[in-house]
Amino acid sequence: MSYDEEAVAVANLHDEQFFRLASECTVEAWLTFLGHRWSALILYHLSQGPKRFGELSACLPSVTAKMMSERLLSLQRRELLERDGRHRDAAYRLTPKAGQLMPILDALERWARPSPE
């Protein structure tokens, strides 16, 4: 199995889990999806402007190339990211749907901060 085929297979598994949960509760399904490691940070960095794969990797050096590919593909499938261009010149950017999500994630981040004692 090639690297790209493996990334697609993992993304498909996440899709199945997402849709199974979505049938029970859409909020729970989205929180589970967004709670996958690195998703929120990828969205945050792209909220600063479009970035190519290498630029995103530089922002998140702990993320392996395989994991980055899987997360980007999953975010695209949820219509939160768009990829402009092909191959190495491709840039990822937030969709309008993700633009609506960012204030919600910002509010959640503020809510989750520890309160000063």
Image (cartoon, rainbow, N blue to C red):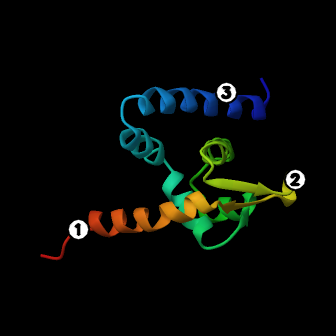
The C terminus lies in quadrant: bottom left
Q: CA distance from mark 2 to mark 3?
A: 21 Å
Residue at image point 61% right, 62% down: 96
Categorize mark 1 by other alpha carbons within 10 Å: few (<14), some (14-19), many (20+). few
Q: Position of residue 31 (x, y in %)?
A: 40, 46
In terms of image quadrants, where is residue 62? bottom right
Q: Residue at x 44, y 68 (%)?
A: 103
For residue 19, above or below residue 40: above
Which mark identifies residue 114?
A: 1
Residue under the image location 50 percent in, 30 percent down: 19
Mark 3 vs mark 1, CA separation in Å = 38 Å
Q: Is residue 108 left or right of residue 15?
A: left
Q: As drawn, which residue projects farthest toward the left?
A: 117
Instruction: Kindly state the secondary structure of the residue where label 2 is placed.
Output: loop
Q: Indicate the position of residue 60 as horizontal and vertical percent values.
A: 59, 60
The residue labelled by disc 2 is: 86
Front-most of residues 111 and 6: 111
| Residue 58, position as x, y percentages in the image | 66, 64
Marks 2/1: CA distance?
42 Å
Residues at circles 2 and 1 in contact by the CB criterion of under 8 Å:
no
Q: Which residue is mark 3?
A: 9
